Structure formats: structure tokens, C-alpha cells
Image (spheres, rainbow, N blue to C red):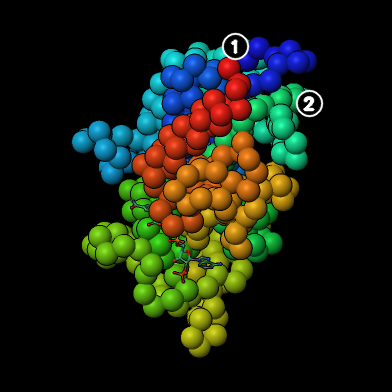
Amino acid sequence: MPEQSENKIEKVVIVGSGPAGWTAAIYAARASLEPLVFAGRPKQVPSLVLPGGQLMMTTEVENYPGFPEGVTGPKMMAKFEQQAVRFGTRIQTDNGQNPDVSDPDDGHSFAYHDCTKVDLSQSPFTVWGENDVCVKAHTVIIATGATANWLGLENEQKLARSGGGVSACAVCDGALPVFRDKELAVVGGGDSAVEEASYLAKFASKVYMIHRRDELRASKIMQQRAMDNPKIEILWNKQVVDVLGDQMISGVRLSDTQSNEESELALGGLFMAIGHTPATAFLDGQLELDEKRYIKLADPYRSTTSVDGVFAAGDCVDSVYRQAITAAGMGCKSALDAEAWLANHGVE
Ligand code: NAP
């Protein structure tokens, strides 16, 4: 259990629980550092950070080595978590008890804590959780990932919050009865948009991909997947300028990005797949970030940041690769870097 006394200083606190966070925990736990993880509380709004990270919104993962038959994102994350706990990782929870992670479907993750803020200005660092939980730490690993982007339209936000058929996660919400046999749309032209459209096509009568340019950003193989699916139609050079509907979405207003001509498209659901923003706002400027607000590494081959003793890993660092395997690799590096830092500073 996450023992906490007034004077205890944790060796390693890990913020985040995607592939980077759990891999850091596995390595740190196996090095007997008894890491404490702020895994993040499950949210009702799908754009926010989930325990398990973005993989909780992914169906089949087919490119993670060691799973030749593929594995679902949630199942893979449950396995990462179980492996981390097996070696002594502690998870910050409501009651201070480590949850039983053997059954990933029992809802135990609802007891997990968000990290609400950090003070990295002096060592030992301070990490706050919910209910004023306050933890001191010699080293901190930030592995908070990145969250889904929205268009920022007023009715998009309103309907997303009220469950009115607008979502940033087709994999979370697309199978709901309300979307069955409806005409749906995905906004975006990247790999995520194709993946989400392909997923929705299993339930929907038709799926439009609304893309603002005349070529997809998605990889060739994913482009082919979209083109080959008879239920997917790509609407080129179109931008959503309004979301229509009161309690439930009824459609969107589109603007042609070449001619500026406007049109309406009737829809039963709208899904955003327009990229992600790194979850770094809680750092409140205490670590150096790049222009897209990803954490800047002090050395590109390490996990070191602008603050000595603070390490970063995964999608909150990486705007390029953003893969489970690359995040896990960075998580490993961060734990090894934290272990070396502790040894160099004589912390036992
Ligand atoms: P992405 O590659 O950044 O694509 C975002 C898409 O959204 C782009 O097509 C972009 O249009 C569009 N977009 C951005 N802002 C917009 C706005 N305000 N209005 C309308 N459209 C907007 O993001 P992603 O698809 O989430 O992929 C992220 C990374 O994960 C990529 O490296 C991708 O390869 C990887 N990924 C891989 C897989 C897979 O292999 N199975 C699945 C999912 C993701 P423009 O093209 O015009 O910029």
C-alpha cells in the first residue's frame, strides 16, 4: 500500500500510466525503488487523460512485438499494470491501498488519483494528488501522454459534454446503440481518422471522413484501408464550421476550403481525430517545453529534462513517433536515469 508519513521521501514518483509510465514502474520496481504511481482517474469526458493512456481508446494493437495475434489496448495496459504491481509498484488511490489489479474489469481504477500539481523548484520535489494528498520525492518521472484535440466550436463542446453524439474517441463511444446503423463522420485525415472510421464502419450505415485537404496524412497502408472500405466516403477539402442539433447532433455545416462554399451534412454522430495535445499544463511552466508544449529533453538520448532529478517519457515528450513501443522504451530509459540519479546522490 502507498505508505505515507509526514517525513517520508519517495525515491521515485511516476505521473502517468500509459506504456511509458508502467514501463518506468516495472523497471523502477525491479530495482527495488518501490515507485509510487499517480495513474490518473478515469474521466467521463473522453478527451482527458485516462489511466492506461491513449491505448485505452485503441481496439486492436497489432504492432507491439510479442503479441503476434494482436491484443486490445486495454488488455495490454492491464498486463503492463499487473507486471508493475507484481514487482512492488504502489498506486496512489483514494484509500491509500494498492488495488487488486488481477481483474481489470472490476472498476478499481476509479480509485486512482490524478496528479493535480507539482513543485519542482526545490529538491525533494512535491507532488500533489486529490484530497490534498502531498508526496515528497527525490525523483519524478513525467509520463502523462497527450490528449485528444477538438475543433473548439461551441456546439461541439456542448454536445460532447452532454453525450449528444459528439466524441473524440470512436473506440470508446462508437459502439453505443445510439450510433448503430447511423450515418457518422470522423474529422481528420491522419492514421487515427482512418482507424476510427474503420472501427465505426462496423456499426454505422456509412462513415464520412471529413478532411480539410485533398490528400490524407495517413500512412499508405491506412489510406488503402479507408479507400477499400465500401462504407467509408472521404469528403475532401472540407472543414466543419458548425455542429448542428440541440440535445443530439443532427448534422454539421461544412465549408469547402478551396471555394468557401458552405453545405450541410446530416449525421447521427461526429468523432474528432485531429491530433493530440501533450498533457503538460499541470507542470505550470516548471519544465522547459517546446513550442507545441511537449516536454523538452535536456539530452535527446536520455530522459533528462530542464530540472535535475525530473525525467520525462512517452507521448508528453514525443510529437513524432507516439507509439506504444517507443513510449515503453522511453519509460525504461527514465527509470534507469532515475535509478542512476539516486545512486549518484547517495539515496538508498
Ligand atoms: P495526425 O497525424 O497529426 O493527424 C491529424 C489530422 O487531423 C490531420 O489530417 C490534420 O489535417 C487534421 N487536423 C488537425 N487539426 C485540424 C483542425 N483544426 N481541423 C480539421 N482537421 C484538423 O494525428 P493522428 O492521426 O492522431 O496520428 C498521430 C500519430 O499516431 C501519427 O504518427 C500516426 O501515424 C500514429 N497513429 C498510428 C496508427 C496506426 O498505425 N495504426 C493509428 C493511429 C495513430 P492535415 O493533414 O491537413 O494537417
Residue 277 coordinates in the image, percent (x, y): 57, 54
Could you say which quadrant of the image residue 92 lies in? top right
Q: In which quarter of the image is the N terminus?
A: top right
Q: Where is residue 138 in the image (x, y as percent from the top left)?
A: 65, 28
Give how far apart the Cα atoms at labels 1 and 2 are.
18 Å
Q: Is mark 1 on a helix, strand or loop?
A: loop
Would you name the residue on which mark 1 appears? 1
User: Is 141 placed above or below 109 here?
Assistant: below
Ligand 1 is found in which quarter of the picture? bottom left
Which residue sits furthest left? 68
115 and 104: which is toward the camera: 115
Q: Residue drawn at (65%, 32%), measured in percent from left and top?
A: 114
| Residue 137 position by quadrant | top right
Left or right of 73 on screen, residue 146: right
**Residue 246, horizontal then vertical, whole percent:** 66, 57
> Dot 2, crowdedness within 10 Å: few (<14), some or many (≥20)?
few
Q: Image point 43% across, 76% down: which residue?
A: 213
Residue 310 pos. (x, y %): 61, 38
Q: What residue type is labelled 2?
A: Asp
Query: Tag 2's secondary structure?
Result: helix
- Foreground of the two, 187 or 348: 348
Above or below, 169 against 51 in this view is: below
Residue in view at x 37 percent, y 69 percent: 216
**Closer to us: 47 or 30:** 30
Res 172 label: none
Q: Name the residue under label 2.
A: 132
